[in-house]
Image (spheres, helix red, strand yellow):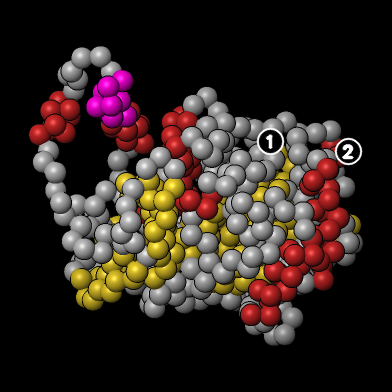
Amino acid sequence: MLDGKRRMRILFTALLLASAASGCANGPSRDPAAKELASTKYDPHALDVFHVALAPGADESERTFSWHTQDTNKKGVVELSRLDEEGNVLSSETFEATVEDILRGRSRHKATVSGLEENQLYSYRFGDGHRAWSKSYTFRTQAEGGFNILFFGDPQIGAGEGAWIDADGWDRTVTAATEMFPDTAFLVSSGDQVNKANELSQYDGWFFPEELTAYPIMTIAGIHDDSPFTDYFNIPNETGLGEDSEGSDFYFTYGNTLFMALNSQSSDIAEHKEAMELAIAENPDATHRIVFLHKSLYSSANHALDEDVLVLRAGLVPIFDELEIDAVLMGHDHVYVRTYQMKGDEVVGEIAYNEEGAAIDPDGTVYLTGNSASGSKYYELQDASVYERYAAVALQLEEPTYMNIKVTDDSLTFTTYKVSDLSVVDEYSIIKTVGE
């Protein structure tokens, strides 16, 4: 994998070349790469794709794709190939895509592949349905049993000193996390992928990490993502509930866990409840239940007392109690917070812990807010009186972090790391013995 700084230099060179080609630069370029670019002949069999979004599907046997091309009416396809450990193709299958025009002469394609086998290496590439193909990418599925996922607080590319500075920070975080946990099942971004959704350079920055073509990433809609969110991502099991221009509540399973994502731009509590009840009814045997949403219900910084946040807290917390949600993972406030076990908006009084400090069959729900994953923006902590009643940990480290979530048959472990030195910021485990 290329060093991050070298990759940035290459990208800046490409941007300058593109600027020159469009007439925005004066005089001919002296960069040798420009001569190579100019001498490259058009290849009718090469399909130029960009903003490739690989994501989890409805369950572990599926993946969803979204990708962009220049404006076209060709729906396109995904070719999925099973590979042996030497990279030789064992079998291939194509899956049809949809196509839709989006802004600035671009077309968006979406497809879902199914029938994935466990612990299997795959390659994929995109075609126009005729004879042109993109380059190939690879990913690996995991073996059955326990798994882990990586959770990232708001990248919000463009909120800092510049989109490409933020993109470099995002790239470093994703690289550090996946190198530490190379067998990760999938990634989650807690919302606000970008700062201004209609600025293409910011989404260029969000898609910059190469790892995003090898690890599926589930994106949660944030307040800055706005309606272009649906132009970039292909979400499974959308319910049509809690809907706005960014989409609606959705759910998916992986292994023994049901994941439910709520669109926190909607304050329709009844629809959010209906969406979760639907997901649970479809997956009654899931051992663990985890909810994702963008706006943090229990935070400690700028948004901790926002009216819309307090409305969501008052409406959703009793439902999470009723539906026995184990954990709620959130973003929005660019700070790290882990609550105590909460029930009825109160701290659960009595909890048993084992010798390692894991909570044994705790009542209630734990709420975790992810810090900035890119370093683009941080918020100052409020006075402790705002959050001390519910926050077991509240930190503003002013440096990027990420969270690893380890899932087993009977436990959930949430560990947050600093990107700078990979040291542990916080760790919390829940163990379930009920029904053993």
On the image, the x and y values in percent for residue 331 come to 66, 47
Q: In this view, does 313 lie to the left or right of 421?
A: right
Picture quarter with the N terminus = top left
Query: Is 51 positioned to the left or the right of 429 in the image?
Result: left
Tell me what residue is drawn at x 44 percent, y 47 percent. Answer: 102
Q: Is the magenta stretch mostly helix, strand or loop?
A: helix
Res. 394 in view = yes
SS at mark 1 in the image: loop
- Label 1 vs label 2: CA separation? 16 Å
For image coordinates 73% across by 63% down, the residue present is: 272
Q: Quadrant of residue 95?
A: bottom left
Q: Name the residue under label 2.
A: 385
Q: Mark 1 points at which residue?
A: 396
Quarter location, residue 396: top right
Residue 243 is marked as none
- Residue 373 position (above or below residue 112): above
